[in-house]
Each structure stands twice: as structure tokens, then as C-alpha cells.
Amino acid sequence: MTEIALADDALAAVRALLEDVPDPEIPVLSVVDLGIVRDVRADAGTIEVVITPTYSGCPATRVIEQEIRKALDAGGYARARIRTALYPPWTTDWLSEAGRAKLREYGIAPPVGVSADKRALMADDAGVPCPRCGSAHTTRVSEFGSTPCKAHYTCDDCLEPFDYFKCF
């Protein structure tokens, strides 16, 4: 086996380890599902994990780094580095399709639209479907839900409350 193949195997193994590191605020999502893990690469003979927090003031960033470090250490990659990259900034576009499905199953509406339309930060989120019944007849109750990255909604059909993961 060549050195390149060994590096590829190690990178794939690290990616697989990170699939099991949950986001501390939404534990049904892994840090990979959420798109926080931006890259896993070999750099000067060392594995480097590049992460981007969901926003610069995210209170979970330190915990996420610690959980990634624990997973790397437990997996035999104690020499791997973790690097934080703030540019380009994280976007909900980085959520995986599997992550979006997990959010719905968990009762959180995934982001509607894409972040390229920055008006989404200021405008009403029209057509946020209820993650429980699928109805588009929903009403925003509060701009902020259980965390700053979510808004609180209620479904006008099934009457259930739910969080919406804002598009940004």
C-alpha cells in the first residue's frame, strides 16, 4: 500500500470518527451533518481537521472543539490538529441532506432557501413547513427559539409548536 493510500485511509477514518461527534445544542446532528467540519486533510504529514463555527459568538464552539479532540484521541489520532477557519463564514447551505432530514425527524424545521439571498436574515420566512405534519400554514411566534440560530413557530393546522433553523 502506498503512502498516499495510507493517508487517504486515515483521512476517511477521521471523517468517520467525526460523524459520531454530536452538536451540543442539537445532539441529533453530528458536527459533519451540520457542516462545522469543513475539511479533513493531510498537512505536512499531520492530519488537520478544519472547523468553522456556525457564528463567531457561538457558545458551543469550545465544547465542539473539545469533543472533536476527544474523538481524535480515542481513535488514535492524538497528533491531529484542529484549526478554526472563520472565512468564508459558515452558512446553512453547508447542512447535509442527511442533517436536514434529521432536523425534521427531531421536530425542527430545516432552513428554507439558500443563504445567498441575504434578505432572508431580515424578511419573514414565508412557507416554513411544519416538521411534524408538513403543513405550510405556520406562524412565527418569536424571532428567537431555543437558541439564537432558531426561530419559534407554531403550526396553524396541527397546532404544534416547533423551532425553525434560520437560513443564514
Image (tube, rainbow, N blue to C red):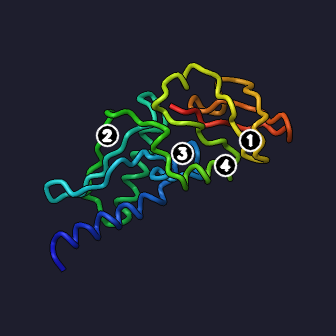
Give amino acid for label 1.
Cys
Question: Tag 1: Cα neighbours inside 10 Å, few (<14), some, or many (≥20)?
Answer: many
Instruction: Tell me, yes or no, whether the two marked residues, 1 and 3, touch with CB atoms within 8 Å.
Output: no
In the displayed structure, does residue 47 sit left or right of residue 112? left
Query: In the displayed structure, would residue 163 be above or below residue 79?
Result: above
Q: Which mark is residue 104?
A: 4
- Residue at mark 2 to residue at mark 1: CA–CA distance: 34 Å
Q: In the rendered structure, find residue 29 and report the number of the disc placed on it.
A: none
In 3D space, how far apart are the residues under numbered discs 1 and 3 (Cα atoms)?
23 Å
At 54% from the left edge and 45% from the top edge, which residue is drawn? 24
Position of residue 122 measured from the top left corner of the image (x, y, whole percent): 57, 19
Q: Toward which corner of the image does residue 3 lie, by quadrant?
A: bottom left
In the rendered image of this protein, does residue 116 appear above or below residue 15?
above
Check disc 2 and report the residue beneath it.
Answer: 84
CA separation, marks 4 and 1?
Answer: 9 Å
Secondary structure category for the residue under label 4: helix
> Which is closer to the viewer, label 1 or label 3?
1
Q: Residue at x 65, y 23 (%)?
A: 124
Q: Which residue has dot 3 on it?
A: 24
Mark 2 lies on a secondary structure that is strand
Residue 17: x and y in percent read 41, 62
Residues 146 and 135: in front is 135
Q: Amino acid at mark 3?
A: Pro
- The residue labelled by disc 1 is 130
In the picture, the quarter occupied by the N terminus is bottom left
Taking the spot 26% from the left edge, 67% from the top edge, the residue there is 8
Q: Residues within 10 Å of mark 2 (few under 14, many from 20)?
A: some
Q: Name the amino acid, label 4.
A: Arg
Q: Position of residue 157 (x, y in %)?
A: 86, 38
> What kind of element bears circle 1?
loop
Q: The disc labelled 2 sits on which kind of residue?
A: Thr
Mark 3 or 4, nearer chain start: 3
